[in-house]
Amino acid sequence: MKKYAFALLISPFLFFIFTNCKKSKSNTEKTPVKDTIVVKIDSVEKKPITTIDTVDFNQRMLALSNKDTTGRWPVKAPYPLPGALLPYNRIIAFYGNLYSKRMGVLGEYPRAEMIEKLQAEVAKWQAADSSVTTIPALHYIAVSAQAAPGKANRHNMRMPFKQIDTILSWAKPINALVFLDIQVGHSTVKEEVTQLEEYLALPNVHLGIDPEFSMKNGEIPGKKIGTMSADDINDAIAILARIVREKKLTPKILVVHRFTQGMVTNYKAIKTVPEVQIVIDMDGFGSQVLKRSTYLRYIYREPVQFTGFKLFYKNDNWNDWKIYTPEQLLEFTPKPSYIQFQ
């Protein structure tokens, strides 16, 4: 059964990788019990900027935990800076790349049709759970893994900035968030995220990183499932936190994809900070039973902060499989705060 599950829960991006190349800490901090907490951006000047309602925040986090009795959820972590999106909102994201119709719904359909489908999904989720605000997002693959090494020998391809500009222009009319997704290949999280800092300094732009395509020992992306350690993830957190402090922004969201044990190692060492909200996103397609099992194994049992769940329009509806509905996913413990469609 384990071999069967592993074989099914893989990303359909693996198919694209080869066809494309032919073409060209632990969370041990105690939660404060006072009603509000002063949040400071500048640790040198010690100037308080505002407060958050920690009673409301705690209640919302408890609601997300969906009556978990194990003590895992909600996760104990520092309170976020004011303006944090989570747990006040649920994000519904369309994933993909404009160069390929096979990498996700974002690039599969014409802009107007894609936006209409996204808004329909947002409406479904808002109707299913009115306790939070449901907001749209475009999750764009800004660095894609490649089987070929390329001139820089990184085994990835950085998308032209004009594509990111296009995604930003699509997001603006519908007040959508933008996520820039990184598949490092033979590069590093630090190197790939750094070259996108100008965009990450924008208030509505957030980050995604994909351990599946982080090849530590020189393997070709797509030949095996990659891995990231807490150190890799902490590199991304550190960059985002610095940007938030320097630009005096509201917290950034970091989405980390996962569908196997080895994709994320030493999860207890992942740092939680006020400037960054971490979502571990259950990736991979398959039957409802298999996907729920994967969520329990790698997301529920190894808590970091918030959770996400990925849905595949085609591959989750294959054969006699049925894609999860909002109502079904809201029964999960914890409830996912980020839903991604591919």
Image (tube, rainbow, N blue to C red):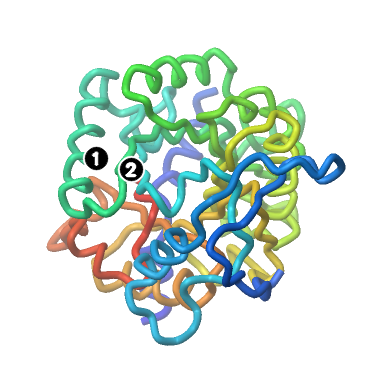
Residue 333 image-quadrant placement: bottom left
Report the Cα–Cα distance between label 1 and label 2. 6 Å
The disc label shown at residue 196, or none: none
**Upstream in sequence: badge 1 or badge 2:** 2
Residue 272 image-quadrant placement: bottom right
Q: Nearer the viewer, residue 152 or 78?
A: 78
Quadrant where the N terminus sits is bottom left
What residue do we see at 56% from left, 35% from top? Answer: 144
Q: Nearer the viewer, residue 203 or 146?
A: 203
How many other residues sit within 10 Å of disc 1, few (<14), some (14-19) or many (≥20)?
many
What residue do we see at 75% from left, 32% from top? Answer: 246
Dot 2 corresponds to which residue? 92
Find out whether the residues at labels 1 and 2 contact each other: C-beta distance under 8 Å: yes
What residue do we see at 32% from left, 23% from top? Answer: 174
Q: Is residue 234 visible?
A: yes
Q: Position of residue 146 (x, y in %)?
A: 59, 37
Q: Amino acid at mark 1?
A: Val
Q: Position of residue 331 (x, y in %)?
A: 24, 69
Q: Left or right? Give the position of 87 relative to 136.
A: right
Q: Nearer the viewer, residue 305 or 212?
A: 305
Q: Is residue 187 visible?
A: no
Look at the picture and state if 77 lies above or below 316.
Answer: below
The disc label shown at residue 122, or none: 1
Secondary structure under tag 1 reads helix
Q: Amino acid at mark 2?
A: Ile
Q: Left or right? Give the position of 65 relative to 216.
A: left
